[in-house]
Amino acid sequence: MDQEQKLKEVVRERYGKIAEQGKAENAASCCGATSPSTKVYNIMMDDYSGTDGYLEDADLGLGCGLPTQFAHIQKGDVVIDLGSGAGNDCFVARHETGPEGKVIGIDFTPAMIKKARANAEKLGYNNVEFREGDIDQMPVNDQVADVVVSNCVLNLVPNKEKVIREIYRVLKPGGHFSISDIVLIGDLPEALRQDAEMYAGCVAGAIQKSDYLSFIEQAGFQSIQIQKEKIITLPDDILEKYLSQEEIQQFLSKQTGIFSITVYAEKPGEKIKKPKLSLEQLQSSSSCAPGSGCC
C-alpha cells in the first residue's frame, strides 16, 4: 500500500469513528479527529444554527466555514457536496435548490453514508442522494453539476490537484464551486506534519495557500476569489501533545498562519439557462389529472 492510500485509510477509519461522536466533541478538536481541547470550543467550525435547511442531527461539527452561504445556489440547480458526512451541507443546499433541483453528496466513509441516508429519509427528501466514493475519482458523470460545494475536506485528500481536476470535470460549462478549506502560510513543525492523527485533523494535510490557489488556476478555472478568510489558532493543549514548550514558542513566533478560507471559482463556458415553467406546467408535473390512471 503506497503512502497516499495509507493516508486515505487513516482518514476513513478515523471518520468512521467520528460519525458516532457528538457535535461538541468534534467541534472542540481539529475537524473532530484529534483529542478535544479543554481550553476552547469551536476551533474551526462556523455556526449553522440560523441557516435555512439546517438539520441539527446532520451537523457533526466538522466544518471550517459555510460554503453554501456563498455558493449562489439557484432553484433547480444540481449541487454536489464533496465529503458530505452526515449530510449537513447537502440539506442546506437542498433548501436553496428546492424540490425541483438535485443534491448529490459524496463520501468515502460507509458510516457517514449510512448516517446521511437515514437523515434524508427522516426528512422525506427524494432529491438528495448520497454516493460512496473518493472525491478524487467521483462516482459522477461529466458535466453534471451547476454548483460544487465542500466544507473542510480537500485538506484530507493527499492528491488535491486531482480533486480540483475532478471538480472541473463534473461541473457544467459556466458552473462554479464554493469550497471552505484549511490552508497554510508558512511551514508547520515537522512533528505536526508527520502525525497521522493531525493529518486526519485537517491541519497536517493542509498545503500553502498560494499552491492551493495555483492548482485551481492551473485546472482551468476563472474568476477565482476568496469569499471569506479567518485565522485558526490551535490551543496549547493540542500543541503540547506534539511539541515541547520551546517548540511551541518557536512555532508561534514564526508567524505561521493556519487559515480557513472559502474559495469561489467558475468553469469557463456559457451557462445553459433553465426553462421557466408556467404555473400550469408546474401543477401538471406535480399532480395527477383526475381519471388519468397515474395515481
Image: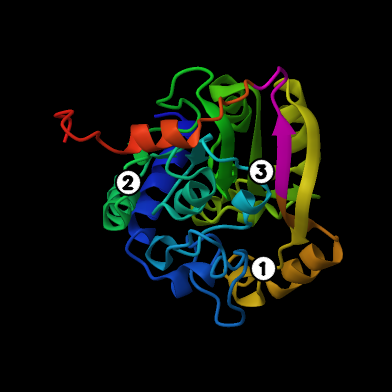
* Camera sees residue 132: no
Distance from disc 3 to disc 2, alpha carbons, whole Å, reads: 26 Å
Task: Name the front one of labels 2 and 1.
Answer: 2
Label 2: how many residues lie within 10 Å, few (<14), some (14-19) or many (20+)? Answer: many
Residue 233: horizontal and vertical position, in percent? 71, 68
* Residue found 47% across the figure and 67% down from its top: 26
Name the amino acid, label 2: Ile
Task: Name the front one of labels 3 and 2.
Answer: 3
Q: Mark 1 points at which residue?
A: 234
Say which element carries label 1. Answer: loop
Q: Is residue 269 magenta?
A: yes
* Residue found 42% across the figure and 63% down from its top: 55
* Camera sees residue 11: yes
What residue span does the magenta drawing correspond to? 262-271
Q: Is residue 224 left or right of residue 202?
A: right
Q: In this view, does 6 lie above or below 53?
A: above
Name the amino acid, label 3: His
Q: Name the residue under label 2.
A: 113
Q: Earlier in the sequence, mark 1 or mark 3?
A: 3
Residue 249: horizontal and vertical position, in percent? 79, 71
